[in-house]
Image: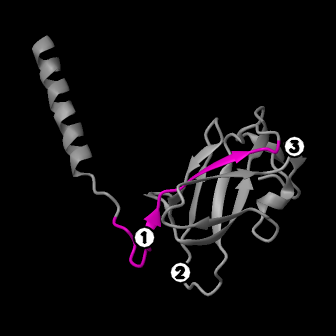
Amino acid sequence: MIKYQGMCCVALGMLLLMAVGCAKKSKKPDGLPDLHPLSVKLVYDDGTPVEEASIQLSNTDKSLTQRWVSGGKTDNQGNAIIRTHGEFPGAPTGNFKVIVNKEEVITDDSSYPPRITARYNHVEKQYTTVQNTPLLVDVKPDTKSVELKVGKKVREAIAGPPG
């Protein structure tokens, strides 16, 4: 019996290795421009890192017909590695507005499914929309990292119905 279990474990391990080895990497989409490694550090005005915030880069060149979605999520030190289409490391060359959101969701867990009762953003509202954000990044081949300040830490209710 023990010999049989050992053989099963070895066979399962080999199958897993084959599956991982055979997994295809995603092909880059047609027209995807060269991407340049970019990390972004988000801090509040007092220097405190903005943890677990989402970052989105929005190209300011309106003449582009193809939009490439680039962004990331900060870690507990406020650092994010930017990826394009969530999978390809780096961002294309260009001037970008930077949109930042750090959302807190409060739920009522006594109901099933849990019901959202409130939502809050922890960055000032001006940084959360492409129309109002003052944050800009100029991505060039030699731009490796940038640090951006997002004002003071806030806890503002997000208007509109929860969800």
Q: Position of residue 87 (x, y in %)?
A: 45, 57
Amino acid type, mark 3: Arg
Look at the image and tell me in which quarter the N terminus lies. top left
Is 150 left or right of 88, judged from the image as shown?
A: right
Q: Position of residue 6 (x, y in %)?
A: 15, 19
The local secondary structure at tag 1 comes to loop
User: Could you tell me which residue is drawn at 48 percent across and 57 percent down?
Assistant: 37
User: Is the image coloured rainbow, by chain, by secondary structure, or in one colour?
Assistant: one colour
Residue 65, magenta (yes or no) = no
Q: Position of residue 104 (x, y in %)?
A: 77, 42
Amino acid type, mark 2: Gln
Considering only order in the chain, which callout, 2 or 3, is on the residue closer to the N terminus? 2
Q: Which mark is residue 90?
A: none
Is 10 left or right of 45, judged from the image as shown?
A: left
Is 147 left or right of 157, judged from the image as shown?
A: left
Q: Which mark is residue 155?
A: 3
Q: Quadrant of residue 113?
A: top right
**Disc 3 crowd, CA 10 A, few/some/many (<14, 14-19, 20+):** some
Amino acid type, mark 1: Asp
Magenta stretch bounds: 27-45
| Residue linked to disc 1 | 34
Is 3 left or right of 85, judged from the image as shown?
A: left
**Disc 1 crowd, CA 10 A, few/some/many (<14, 14-19, 20+):** few
User: Could you tell me which residue is drawn at 19 percent across and 25 percent down?
Assistant: 9
Q: Quadrant of residue 125?
A: bottom right
